[in-house]
Image: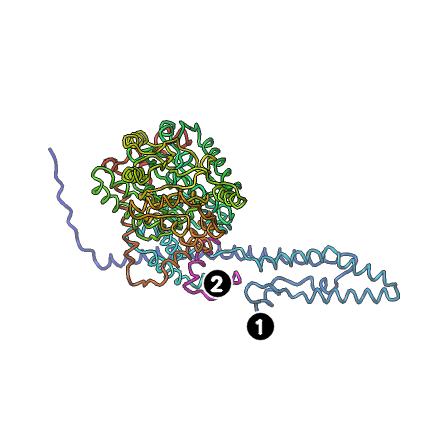
Amino acid sequence: MINFRPPKTRTRPSASSNSAVTEKALSFISKGWKEVRSSANADLQLIKNRANSFKNLADRELVNFLNSASISPFVVPTITASATTKLSEIRRVYSSPEFKWPAQGKLKLDLSAIKNAIVAEVELEEEVLKGSNSSSRVDIFEGIKNSEFVVKVKSSLKSICKEAEDPKGVPPLDVPELLAYLVRQSSPFLDQIGIRRDISEKIVESLCSKGQSKLLLHSLHRGGSPLIDGEIMNDELDLRIASVIQSTGHCYEGGFWGDSTKQNLAGDKRHVAIVTTASLPWMTGTAVNPLFRAAYLAKSEKQNVTLLVPWLCKSDQQLVYPNQLTFSSPEDQELYIRNWLEERIGFKANFKISFYPGKFAKERRSILPAGDTSQFIPSRDADIAILEEPEHLNWYHHGKRWNDKFNHVVGIIHTNYLEYIKREKNGALQAFFVKHINNWVTRAYCDKVLRLSAATQDLPKSLVCNVHGVSPKFLKIGGKAAADRQSGQKVFSKGAYFLGKIVWAKGYRELIDLLSKHKTDLDGFNLDVFGNGEDAHEVQSTAKRLNLNVNFMKGRDHADDSLHGYKVFINPSISDVLCTATAEALAMGKFVVCADHPSNEFFQAFPNCLTYKTPEDFVAKVEEAMSSEPQPLTPEEQHKLSWEAATQRFMEYSDLDKVLTSETRLDRRRRKGMGKSFSMPNLEEMVDGGLAFTHNCFTGNEFLRLCTGAIPRTRDYDKQHCNDLHLLPPQVENPIYGW
């Protein structure tokens, strides 16, 4: 059985009970306070006793020090007389209102007592030694100067003054400075989400102005100008951060932000990276011309140069390189490239050759990058990028944005892709899409675009300029031909020829049409054709079926001795952008018969270039060339064809001469946004960032890549590339959580 207790009845306490409780509480508090006070008094007395003990000990040490100052060969009676001086007396003197401390860290000691003591002692010694010879007095003064006491005083004063003049304390970064540095480092991300970079710089300057007093103090300490305006505020922030990091002894080797921001490179030399889509021994324009560009940019030794070319696995090498030539390693191919180059330019080019993974697309007859090409240029060298065929390099580019990683990106358009595509099935529709994709990628990834001729697609940020030249070897051949002819020798013993890769788009369709329509008009005219290519069998069978006077021979180097005796170079192609073979033929002093086309505008200024507009005009130009002799090139014309002149044009039209002479990335960005209003958003940069972001998303999807014609599984390089180039597997190099 459970018993329930009734609840207790609560009664209201009386006034007397309240008073008793209050009295007890006050008594307890009073008792506690007395204990705390007595304990505190005991602690204070203990501290005071220890201070007095320390003072007495210091007094004794001071007395011992002053007494030890009386060292032979002289005595300082003035100091020893006051040897009983206490620290309390010294403290009372220096704490008096009349005493003033020296200004800002300059420590001055009143050594008049020591000086008076030394002077008095010297006078006393002079009186004692009166009548002594001068040599004795010299010995006395030498003894005074070299005495242990004086040496100790001097060393102590030097150490004190050094500490006062060279303070090592650096004030830490405050919150506005940290925020300003964070905004600056985040500028690529802010640019992607639509916040233009000059607005970010304005935020940085605003934050820096809040910490202007600290920056001003730092500037004054370094002996700089006390004026800090908006133009140098960011530079002062850089110096502040550098000084703080240096004071901690920390050495930064790169990290989270290192690969996603442009680098401000150290040292006197800038770095130029040339990225191209082909490599020797494939004798194509994008293999030869970037190679010469790298050599002549490196020749000035004003900047370091790296040439980045594609590496093909052996199976692809057999499809691309002539005469079944293959390489077992990148080092073997690099040796072949350098030997070929030095034979043609006549000097040793000091530049670096690197390789990136590439795949050969049989349908497109071109090499496409596999993986992120930009990662094969280290961040420390990511300064200036020259993209040879930027649209080709970036069709399926899935990686870092070039003009985020590099300070300045120049694209050079080599190929008229729209002209080639229009010749294919459903060419008009394909050309429509390719045209807009080319606009997309060049605008998103390039700061400047150079078109070799007006035959190329008109792209954003582009202008027309021929930045290609010819090898010195061809100019030497032309000079020798002119000298031989001047001496009365017969230079050209052969007629007309054509040299080029045998594919229909390289002008063979136009050539066969012209020769077949005017077979009777060109009776007795023979043409030798040198080349190899995928359409060789079809082109040869067509010419044979039409009974044309065309002799097909294997492809060879244009500088081969067997080609020197030809007088006329025939090139009816209208798909070329700027035919390298045409420039080489002119350099060798030959006639060139070519179409009146934007791709040949640069050559029309040369008297040996004969252009035609109609098929009938073609016949007339061929007959004129076959019946006359070409004019020797003038020195001005020779220079215009040279790579020296081409490099000068490239430096000027790409703004590279200005970029290379600029001091910092900050100055370049400031000039880029100069004259623009801060109140208006930079729509162009917002669009460019949005295009780059969207393109990166599309190229990351394998299904979309395959729909647009990409080679399967080329978003990353494969295992064979890892073995050939000694690379980490893609899943290790670019983990799924990385960017």
Badge 2 crowding class, 10 Å Cα cut-off, few under 14, some 14 to 19, many 20 or more, is some
Quarter of the picture holding the N terminus: top left
User: What is the image's colouring?
Assistant: rainbow
Front residue of this view, candidates 448 and 611: 611
Q: Which disc, if any, is residue 98?
A: 1
Chain-order first, disc 2 or disc 1: 1
Q: Is residue 64 magenta?
A: no
Q: Amino acid at mark 1?
A: Glu
Q: Which mark is residue 217?
A: 2
Cα distance, mark 2 to mark 1?
A: 30 Å
Position of the C terminus by quadrant = top left
Which numbered tag is attached to residue 140? none
Percent position of residue 393, x then y: 34, 41
Q: Position of residue 491 (x, y in %)?
A: 48, 41
- In the structure shown, which secondary structural element does the residue marked by tag 1 occupy? loop
The answer to whether residue 251 shows anywhere in this view is yes
Relative to 580, 4 lies left or right: left
- What span is colored magenta in the figure? 219-244
Please identify, in this view, whether the residue under mark 2 or under mark 1 is nearer the observer. Answer: 2
Instruction: Give left or right: position of 385 versus 219.
Output: left
